[in-house]
Amino acid sequence: MNRRLVALANAHGVSTWYEDWRHRRVEVAPETVVGVLGLLGVDATSPAAIADALATARAVDRTALPETVVLTHGATRVLPGPGVVTLEDGGRRAVDGELPADLPLGWHRLACADREATLVVVPRRLPVPPRTWGWMLQLYALTSERSWGMGDLGDLAEFTGWAGDSGAGLVLLNPLHAVGPAHPVAASPYSPASRRFVNPLYLRVSDTAAYQAADPATRAVVDALRPDRGDLIDYDEVWTAKRHALELLHPYARPLDLDADPALTTFATWCALAERHGNDWRAWPEELHHPDGPAVAEQRRQLADRVAFHAWLQHLCDEQLDAVTAAARAAGMPVGVVHDLAVGIDPGGADGWQLADVLAQGVRVGAPPDDFNQLGQDWGLAAWRPDRLAATGYAAYRDMLRRTLRHAGGLRVDHVAGLWRLWWVPPGAGAAEGTYVRYNADAMLGILALEAQRAGAVVVGEDLGTVQPAVTRGLRGRNMLGSTVLWFARDGDGDFVPPSRWPRNALATISTHDLPTAPGFLTGEHVRVRDELKLLSTDVAVERARAVDERERLLAMLRAEGLLPDEGVPDDNAVVVAMHAALAGSPTRLLGVSLYDVLGEVRQPNMPGTVDEYPNWRLPLPTTVAEIRSDPRVARIVDLLTAARPRPARPRETGAAED
């Protein structure tokens, strides 16, 4: 690669090579680098353009005040000259050439050397998380006699109360982010229209005040709309029924002040427009492409009833999430409900429309090839532009975190390495033909710490796969937890590492939503399905032999830990219990248990690399909430983990960092 192109890429945080999952150096194609630079607004399409762009990059004054200054509480920072800090509460502090160590946490403004900047003072570290265990849920899969074809927030409140009373300290959810209101309804919780708002598909209609206020005849019509539970979740059927029911109930609701929350009003406007023009704003009439344009204002006036309806749905989501939080607190959960933050958004969705100025237009976020996804991954998601985030004081990132944390005792950050770097796939390229783009990790992680501390939330980073050591160090340094998964906990020879040797600063689980369930792994279902879907890059016989070998290595580890008898062939149910016993013996602070594993489900919730070829995100649990509560398999795991992690004597610690 041309050395000038390499220098230009480095100046803008674009990688020209990376280390793969086998720790081998992989060179990035020059055309990929040129394409990604273009997404950052840098022309590198000719030698002359590269020379001009490199000269511009080198001319930047590195001593000048940056557009956003992130300062760790207790630290100082030298400034280009004297300045004034306007504090978040309106107070003012004069500073003489250095930011002092005693500035309060929060979002401030700094004026210095004829420039102004956002100043964010962030905590050095979060309080130490408790030692506890809990359930990992795909909420759509958790059904009951009262839910409408999929799990809802009423089911979650009931389950959370039972889980807490049974000794669990947390419930970890799939993302509840909003999707588009037009059909077809998106199934993936990791491809949301917005990460700032909630998917109204999860509403329980009968728990709304409007349902209680409606006359008996209206309630009867609403009740008759309830769809039955099917073998697979039909999101379109559920949304059709719930939307109709909620439309019937909307006249019984109290009116909302739409001026009180402009971001909500803009989101509700997008929803109203999406109902008319489709869920991808990029296919709308040109005059509707800008939220602040006059045509959008006119449409908002014409569609006032629909805007009010969608704003009301979000109000209902807030109310029902408050009820879930109350159930967790009443049950004495030391953590409570842990929400999941997806790594990105659908570029055609609400956030892509409203936040277009801080997003890289045309990029698709994904991951390079690895052991489980041998062709790479293209998630089709939009990505923040790191330069635009800094220029706007990280306001969009902050606001997203605040809305997500409003109802959270914890936050799981999917693909947390994305706070350091993200795999960008330029237009026209395949999933393996991307490269990494760097972010300001001190800013991204520090702001996350600030907003989590203000919300009183634990942070868990999903740091699996090809992750740089800086990610693990960064999480540990701020008392954020990493992730440890049994399938990935191997030594250099491929043998399973005993959980007693797992890191303490983590959420430990057997599997994830993207990996085989415990029963699926033991039966080789993951090989059979990937072969059927043509997702294997090696011969199926090789993969089957490998699966048999991995099962034997797992059994060897469990026997060595005294969790299985030394002789005989154990049945799969005994192995699943032994796996959870191994989990319970780990020193990790948090333990997460999947109902798919405990209830014997061989199918994994999501198969990376597929869309419609596999029933991703549409698999209900084999039993209802009531049946789960009385299932002897569940009771055995509850007893095992509650004995290993008894409820702490007091709420979550708020003291100094762990040594």
Image (cartoon, rainbow, N blue to C red):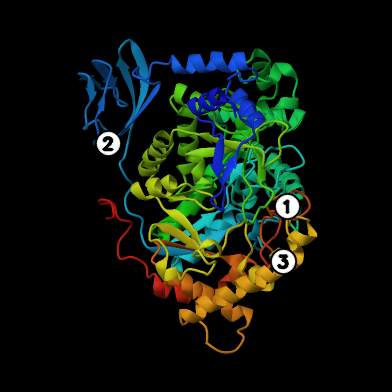
Residue 484 rendering spot, x and y as whole percentages = 48, 59
Q: Is residue 633 visible?
A: no
Residue marked by disc 3: 542
Amino acid type of the residue tagged 3 in the rendering? Val
Residue marked by disc 2: 73
- Dot 2: few (<14), some (14–19), or many (≥20) neighbours within 10 Å? some
32, above or below 165, in the image: above
Real-space CA distance between mark 3 and mark 2, rounded to the nearest whole angstrom: 54 Å
Residue at the far bottom: name it.
567
Amino acid type of the residue tagged 1 in the rendering? Ala
Residue 555 rendering spot, x and y as whole percentages = 56, 78
Of callouts 3 and 2, which one flags the residue occurring earlier in the amino acid sequence?
2
Q: Is residue 308 left or right of residue 240?
A: left
Residue marked by disc 1: 220
In this rendering, the label closer to the viewer, 3 or 2: 3
Foreground: 74 or 644? 74
Can you tell which quarter of the image residue 295 is in?
top right
65, above or below 17, in the image: above
Amino acid type of the residue tagged 2 in the rendering? His
* Tag 3 near tag 1, CB within 8 Å: no
